[in-house]
Image (cartoon, grey):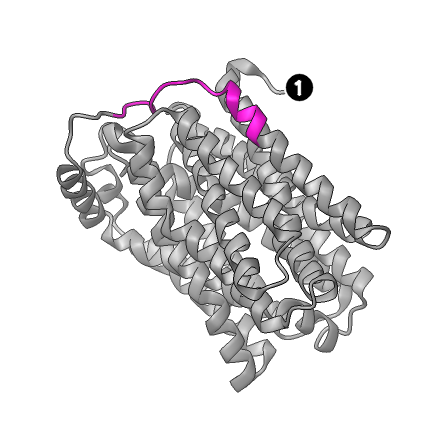
Amino acid sequence: MISTRLFGREVILFSVILFFVEFVRGAALISFIPIFGEKTLGLSLDIIGIAITAHYLTDTALKMAIGYLLDRFSIRFVVHAGLLASLVGIFLLQFAYQPWLFITAAALYGVGISPIWIVCLTKVSEDRRAMQMGFLYTIWFVGIGSGPIVTNILLDYSTPVTYYLLLGLALLCWVLSLFITNRKSSGATSSLPLREQFVILKDRLRHMRLLLPGMVLQTMGAGMLVPILPSFAEHKLGMTGAQYSLLLLAGGACTVIGLIPLGRLSDILGGKKWFLVLGFGLIGASLYLLSLAPPMWQCIVLTAILGLSYATLLPAWNALLANYVPPKQQGLGWGIFSTVEGIGGMIGPVVGGSLATWQGQSAVLWYSGIMYAVIGFFYIWFPFRAFKDNSHGNT
């Protein structure tokens, strides 16, 4: 049972909404949209790819604007309007026999995803930030991971049932958002002009400029793996579909198990440096070893290490970024930072696909591993006292 003392009633409500939003998102993007688009609507794979890209583009591009809205309007209004856009996007999919409508529906769904995560980031408490972020990432990971699993099973029996399940859950999220508090985001102010807010955030970005490479490169490294992992598992590792599912389960389970305790440990120990160095370094080493195509049992061990490394990295990383969010512009600040991180996620698949074509699938894991290792080594030598510079008292 989730303790309201540790997380607060608002965070619990947002967590429930976040879970169902990410469940539908994972189910739609990874399973339903590609299968439904090709087999039911008869669309080509390039149109399906453009639609998924449109989703991520609108989601990332609008994070900054939604952050600004959160600093101007009530949380309920912004989240409710966003989830309505998601609901409309899912609803339009059943009629999207024309490519333009299919792409529009996916893009509209991306618009609706943006608010809830930004709101969650602004709601965690300062004294338990890393632990609560670990909790939120657990909710996100379980939701986005379980969605495709359930959808793949249901699609074997009935496509309409699968569709109406996703539509019903999108409707549920929209209804739940009615219970959100009808006030502005914590610390928001309507008296500060947008130009002045950007001056403050520009100053924040200047002070954290040495963190910017990590913000972009870590999401880029993950994005590079998306287009090649299933093929790599089949052709390089010789795995069946069931074995590949076991591999993903090992990594996902270790991430979920590790996020909250490692987030709590980060809160207790205070310092974030070695959590970042260890997380980035182990991810780099594990990816490099996986690129050598080891035996099955070694792949499972390496994937488990990847999961724990990810759990080590995420809470400390986001707690660290929180030091640079201006207290009176939290929505806008988190929106900009999420947009910066989203840039890597958008270009990563293109880079990964191109590398696989030119140099082979193993090279993608090798380069991605090298990238993570370089980030880890960089933060060994980085003067972490800069993290306390103008951090508004957050450490």
Work out whether residue 306 or residue 125 is closer to the camera in this orientation and state it: 125
Marks counted in the figure total 1
Kind of residue at disc 1? Met
Residue 349 visible to an observer of this rendering: yes
State the residue position of label 1: 1
From the viewer's perspective, is 38 left or right of 260?
right
Q: In this picture, which residue range is highlighted in magenta?
A: 174-188
Residue 269 visible to an observer of this rendering: no
Compared to 60, does 192 lie above or below?
Answer: above
Q: Is 151 inside the magenta-drawn segment?
A: no
The percent position of residue 314, horizontal first and vertical second, equals: 48, 44
Q: Residue at x 32, y 43 (%)?
A: 65
Work out whether residue 391 or residue 154 is closer to the camera in this orientation and state it: 154
The percent position of residue 151, horizontal first and vertical second, equals: 74, 49
Q: Is 184 inside the magenta-drawn segment?
A: yes
Dot 1 alpha-carbon crowd within 10 angstroms: few under 14, some 14 to 19, many 20 or more = few
Compared to 139, does 311 lie above or below?
Answer: below
Q: Residue at x 59, y 28 (%)?
A: 16
